[in-house]
């Protein structure tokens, strides 16, 4: 059994109004930041033959459904559990 | 002419567009997301929150059983109209370029909206005048249209920008509110023409979209 932890975020070139809003909110709370970007976190448990196999399956899932390549990018970590 | 309105779990503008299509003169029926096959002249993907807008608007609808032969339907020249969530689904299907993102203000906007008819030489807008200003309401949280520079060049090369916002409410690139594909048979727009198809609801200017299709 493997667990994949996937981050889906907007591409760097895309304006993130949610991030901008949260940056302002943090500022009002007394925290200054360089930048804030908001993304999605997806956790998937799956069966696979090996770490490589799991990695390939997760990559396919990302490409098929989990992210929109027009505006998003993704990365993930996998470990055996 | 036969029109089918797809209903996904979470769609909520299906009946509105059904009535508008009937008013325009279409033989109209519904298609449930699990139905077998598309069988019509005009396929309509209505507004709403298909599959709860989970993950991304339209991300799941794209894989609906009923849309399995949508590419074949489009290849054969079938007409496809995507309104609001329908437009989002068409971009996820890659039948139209670009993507619809969170409104720049991060707010859901529900209001009347003035639009400019940029291209009236399409199946969907031929009854309008070029540069005519029309008012179709908008109701969306993710209507911010994004398109990369290369695809935008291609879009402009075939006059694919059909509608523009007179005053950009959501940050859309180049104020784009509605576009068609190169072949001209697929039209996606964020505003709701079906909500202004009956005078007793304030205006019937939107009916012209559906009547244009009938007059092709």
Image (tube, grey):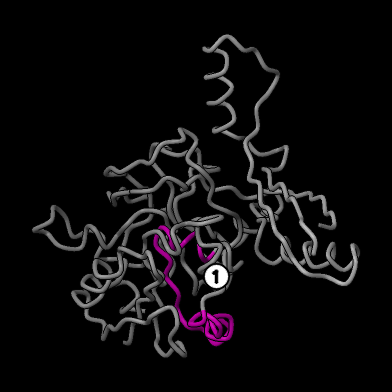
Q: Who's the residue at 58% across and 54% down the image?
A: B99
Residue A69 location, x and y as percent? 70, 55
Residue A1 location, x and y as percent? 79, 64
- Of B39 and A63, the residue lying toward us: A63
Residue B103 location, x and y as percent? 47, 40
- Of A69 and B155, the residue lying toward us: A69
Q: Chain of mark 1?
A: B
Mark 1 = which residue?
B62
Residue B86 location, x and y as percent? 44, 64
Tell me if residue B129 can be seen: yes
Q: Was residue B18 drawn as part of the magenta stretch in this picture?
A: no
Q: Who's the residue at 37% across and 73% down the image?
A: B7
Numbered disc 1: secondary structure: helix
- Of B141 and B18, the residue lying toward us: B141
Q: Was residue B70 drawn as part of the magenta stretch in this picture?
A: yes
Q: Establish if B216 lies above or below B148.
A: below
Q: Quadrant of the N terminus of chain B?
A: bottom left
Q: Establish if B13 lies above or below A25.
A: below
**Which range is magenta?**
B65-90
Residue B20 appears left or right of B187: left
Q: In the displayed image of the protein, which residue is found farthest to the left?
A: B200
């Amino acid at each position: 059994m493997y667990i994949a932890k996937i981050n889906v975020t907007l591409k760097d070139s895309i304006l993130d109004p949610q991030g901008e809003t949260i940056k302002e909110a943090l500022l009002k709370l007394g925290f200054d930041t360089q930048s804030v970007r908001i993304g999605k976190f997806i956790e998937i448990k799956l069966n696979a033959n090996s770490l490589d196999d799991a990695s390939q399956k997760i990559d396919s899932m990302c490409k098929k459904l989990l992210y929109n390549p027009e505006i998003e990018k993704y990365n993930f970590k996998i470990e055996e559990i | 002419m036969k029109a089918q309105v797809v209903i996904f779990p979470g769609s909520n503008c299906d009946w509105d567009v059904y009535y508008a299509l009937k008013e325009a003169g279409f033989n109209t029926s519904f298609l449930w997301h699990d139905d077998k096959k598309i069988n019509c002249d005009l396929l309509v993907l209505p507004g709403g929150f298909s599959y709860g807008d989970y993950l991304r608007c339209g991300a799941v609808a794209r894989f609906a059983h009923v849309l399995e032969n949508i590419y074949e339907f489009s290849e054969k020249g079938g007409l496809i109209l995507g309104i609001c969530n329908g437009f989002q689904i068409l971009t996820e299907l890659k039948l139209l370029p670009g993507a619809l993102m969170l409104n720049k203000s991060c707010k859901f906007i529900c209001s009347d909206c003035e639009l400019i008819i940029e291209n009236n030489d399409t199946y969907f807008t031929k009854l309008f005048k070029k540069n005519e200003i029309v008012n179709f309401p908008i109701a969306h949280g993710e209507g911010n249209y994004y398109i990369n520079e290369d695809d935008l060049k291609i879009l402009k090369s075939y006059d694919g920008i059909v509608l523009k916002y007179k005053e950009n409410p959501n940050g859309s690139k180049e104020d784009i509110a509605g576009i068609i594909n190169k072949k001209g048979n697929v039209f996606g727009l964020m505003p709701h023409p079906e909500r202004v198809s009956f005078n007793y609801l304030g205006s019937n200017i939107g009916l012209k979209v559906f009547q244009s299709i009938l007059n092709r």
